[in-house]
Amino acid sequence: MEVLILLSPLIAFLLIALFGARIGDMASALLCVLGGAFSFLFSLWATSRALSEPFSVKLYDFLPLDAYNLSLGLFFDPLSSVTASVVTFVATVIFIYSIGYMHNLFGQWTFKFYAYLSLFLFAMLLIVLSDNLLGIFFGWEGVGLASYLLIGYFHTQKKASNASLEAFVLNRVGDWFFLFGIVASFYLFGSLSILDIFARVSQVDKALLGLACLLLFGGAVGKSGQLPLHTWLPNAMAGPTPVSALLHAATMVAAGVYMVARLYPMFESAPESLRVVALVGGLTALFAALAATSHTDIKKIIAFSTMSQLGLMFLALGLGDRMSAMFHLTTHAFFKALLFLSAGSVIHAFHHHVHYIYETGRLKRYMPITYASFLVGALALAGIFPFSGFWSKDLIVATAYEKSFLWGVLVSVVSFMTAYYIFREGFVMFHGKEHFRHEQKEEPHESPSVMVVPMLVLSVMAVVAGFFEGWYGGILGVHKELHVDIAVLSVVVGLAGILVAYLVYVKGLIDPQKAYEALKPLHTTLKEQFFTERFYHKVLAGGYLFYSKVIYMTAERQLIDGVVNFTYPAVKGVGGVFRLLQAGRLNLYAFFMAFGFLMLLFITIFWR
Amino acid sequence: MTTIPLEAYLTLSLVLFGLGVFGMIVRRNMVTILMSMELALNAVNVLFVGADAHLSLVDGQVFALFVIALAAAEAAVGLGIIIAIFRLRRVDSTDEITDMRG
Amino acid sequence: MENLLSLAIFLPLVGALFVGIVRRENFSKVLSLGISSVVFFIMLYLFLNFNWSAQGFQYVKRIDWIPSLGISYHVGVDGMAISLLLMTSLVFVVAFLWSLKVEDRSNLYFALFLALETACLGVFSALDFFLFYLFWEGMLIPMYFIIGLWGHDRKVYAANKFFVYTFFGSVFLLLGLASIVVYGYLITGKLSFDYTFHMGFSYPMMLQMVAFLLFGLGFAVKIPMWPVHTWLPDAHVEAPTAGSVVLAAVLLKMGTFGFVRYSLPLFPDASKYFIPLIFFLSLVAIIYTAMMAIAQTHIKRLIAYSSISHMGVVTLGTFAMDLNALNGAIYMMIAHGLSSAALFMSAGFIYDRVHSYHMDDLGGLARYVPKLAVFFMLSGLAGIGFPGLAGFVAEFLVFLGTYKNFPIWAFIAGVGVVLSAAYFLYMYKRVIFEEETLSEYRLEKWRHLKDLELHHTLSFILIIASAFVMGLYPYPFVKIIEQTSRYVLGG
């Protein structure tokens, strides 16, 4: 029965993939939504069971590994089942939204899009629910593929196909580590089932365990777009907006954090690895927040914010606080999906021709609901009381200050910048001047209700999800106190960020263009993500390609194949020498015969 | 009755064979080469018969007879070929028939 | 049961004779397809009835052939052989199915392929050195003509290179075979070419090393291992589609099959001694040829290089001296047979429609031949080891097994996972996705492209479905393969 959680998106995928062309785009979209919805209902039901007692479901024997039999299965505990419910809920809402968003493309094989979405959800659920590392890896690669297909959905554009390629390859780098993490764990624990692993986690060698954890974390770095495998994440915005929402809220990037949380007993037993996790998370949080402050692409700003928030979650995990990381992941799923859907609504209003915040402006007049939704999402992201982001972020801030003052300051700085950049985007898009006037003929309009309703639903969730903090802590067996001082501090920090954005972009205290001009080197550095992207593209990828071609032209064609092809003239040359003996002269042949005979005679007589 | 020593046969045979081979190597006329070949074959015959006389056997003489028959057949075929070549090409020197050059 | 195997081996040859005698095009096509299907079902039957818990060879048939030299007609299969036979017979069915539209000298074409099938099946089932070598060399002749007569522009060059190069390797193989047969004769006074007779021996180290190198060179050329690999890209580039399919799917496996069947059990000590050499060559193959692949603009050349890269994984797993790794290596042979067949079919289809293999001439095909795009993607995913398809199980097992004794080697080899994704998707992007670089002239031409026909679709479905079955439920396959791995590793 629980298998249906997985099967319903899978069946939706197969049906759409096989018959999508015949049943049409609308029917495919509905199938996709149905698959998600059923999956959500089943996971609610499974959650209700799992909360009282964790249980596992065996699927089938997959692979014999010498003496050990690897079987695939699902494991339902509070963590996995609640995450599955959140994932399926957010995904279903996004699916509904995408009907409106993609409607103008119906009739152009848009059923593919829904097939990929269903596949995406299926793969993510596999990660969430699998009871062994290999099953997680199946889903891991599955979301990689689905994201590849979705990011490259507008594949005729060079930008999109490049971004999808980059996403898949960088993810594969992570998968490489992850795969060897699985292998290393197998030799440590003699099993790949996470239950077996948890049971034996205290008995194994700490150093080797740390290595295995780091390898696994390498996979999470790739999937969650952390440093140094981050460049694909902002570029992935080349895909349609519902994809970005799905990618950032429920499926792809959340997988990394979830995986570390899932295997947390392993990481906990190897504290060295947690230190790395914290470091990577903290650095990424700061790095992405800095990059977000100077970007102007509507979706990229939100993308960087995801990276930054994921960094915070990894930081929390690294500091030993699984519950707040997971809770932040959950609330983040709601408000980040909401932000993306609002951004998508804006893009949709301009018929997909607008990508930069300075091409819009003063939209609150035209799109009040979108404005409200964006505002809710932004407030939640900035961590303002009582929105959900406040509750979850507060936990992380508290943990950071508990561990060390330095981490705490880092988180506060990141929070300040978060509030600043998201409200910068909001103010420029919804307040300010109508920059679009001279470009666009029509006035922007509010989106159809098939898009608005999902936004409203998510807005509600973004507000109320925070109140479940106690409950969520309860099911994970952790109880946290609200630290009033820290709560006040983080709200003040958030408000300060908003205030700065307000003063600059609404009141016009400083002209941002002039400021950017004045700080051009800094601005460029931040915008170029400290030139990492350029470095990866030009030096690593370009260099790899260049040297491959050089080696192909030299070592392969000239050296190896040269030697091979040289055998032909070599044999011909040697033959040419012997050919002189074969002059076709009868007398000469007779002479050779006689000479050879004599030589044989001499040898037989004198060779003693 | 003095018997002819084996060495005499051997020497004669060797000289004749050497002449035959020498002829084959230095002469260009194909008929002459064929004749040199006959000479070499007859040198072998002399050896066979001489050895028989020395060992008082008859096997060698039988062999010699075979060789004579073979030489006759060979001469017939060889001359036929030479005439055919001559008719075709109007040459009789081996220098001018080098079609088998590699 | 025993005769069934021999029947399956020689049925195609008989078919080839009939094709040669009757010489009616349609008859040739139907007969070839029919015979290869029958062979496939026989192999399937034998595969399903294979007892994976029993030791030794099964379906064994032995008849004295040249008793004075100790040569016999001796065939039989173990777990590896039956799996490869099944894959081979499937690939031939697909090759015939794919070639249904061949017009040019089709009688000769089908006769050669049928003869080739006999030789390929024979190599995997022979248990006599002499018989093995006979099939091994016999396979060259039809392949030579297939490349040389139905190939593309530089077909004669490629065919000659293929023939001379592989023949060069085979000579060393023959020397190796002779050396151990002679040694067996010296020790026991019995001249025997029988494989099972030689399995019980333990040869002195010196002979092992020499024979290992001789065998190894013969196999390495066929696999092909770096640096004796350059014949493969040329042969693939020039070969007709079905020729490429068989070449990649079946012929390359003979080398690795030889390593597992002959080198490992006959020369266990030498195999251990040469591990660093083989590992080095494998790693170079994995990484270097992956780089070569991404540098290509010719689709088939790229796929050919990717084949070499994957065969590097096979040799790595073969010599890791671990059960899982060996299982994985053998699994990889079959998985790669399927994926490379499908990839070459995709490339061949593109050429049939567009008349170019060059990525610069291509692009944006996704919109015009969508079915092909789907199958091309699936083939590629099978190739790059995507979970759920056969290649992943193989790669996972190889890395798992190799990691046990050689963690660093295994980890470095793992970079192949990244590189293979890079070159395949980079190609896919340029051939199937990107449209901006396309000229108006081509776009206009693309609009009239015809998508996959029924026989194309069927061929793809056969291959891809098999890859999925092996990727999603590898349990029975691995069990059957393990029957071989256990005796090879002397467990």
Image (cartoon, coloured by chain):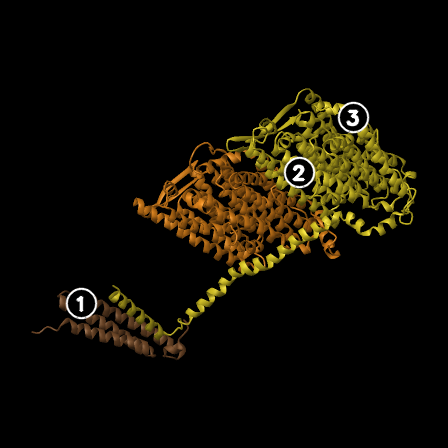
Chain colours: A yellow, B brown, C orange
Q: Is residue B86 visible?
A: no
Q: Nearer the viewer, mark 1 or mark 2?
A: 2
| Residue B69 occupies quadrant | bottom left
Residue A569 placement, left or right of C465: left
Of the 4 image quadrants, the one containing the C terminus of chain C is top left
Chain of the residue on which disc 3 is drawn: A
Residue marked by disc 3: A482
- Between marks 3 and 1, how big is the CA–CA gap? 128 Å
Chain of the residue on which disc 1 is drawn: B
Of the 4 image quadrants, the one containing the N terminus of chain C is top left
Q: Which residue is nearer to you in this view: C448 or A123?
A: A123
| Residue A145 occupies quadrant | top right
Tell me the kind of residue under disc 3. Answer: Leu
Q: Secondary structure at mark 2?
A: helix
Tell me the kind of residue under disc 1. Answer: Gln
Residue appearing at x 32%, y 78% in the figure? B26
- Between marks 1 and 2, how big is the CA–CA gap? 104 Å
x, y percentage for residue C105?
A: 55, 55
Which labelled disc corresponds to residue B61?
1
- Marks 3/2 in contact by CB < 8 Å: the verdict is no
Residue marked by disc 2: A276
Residues flagged by tags 1 and 2 on a common chain: no
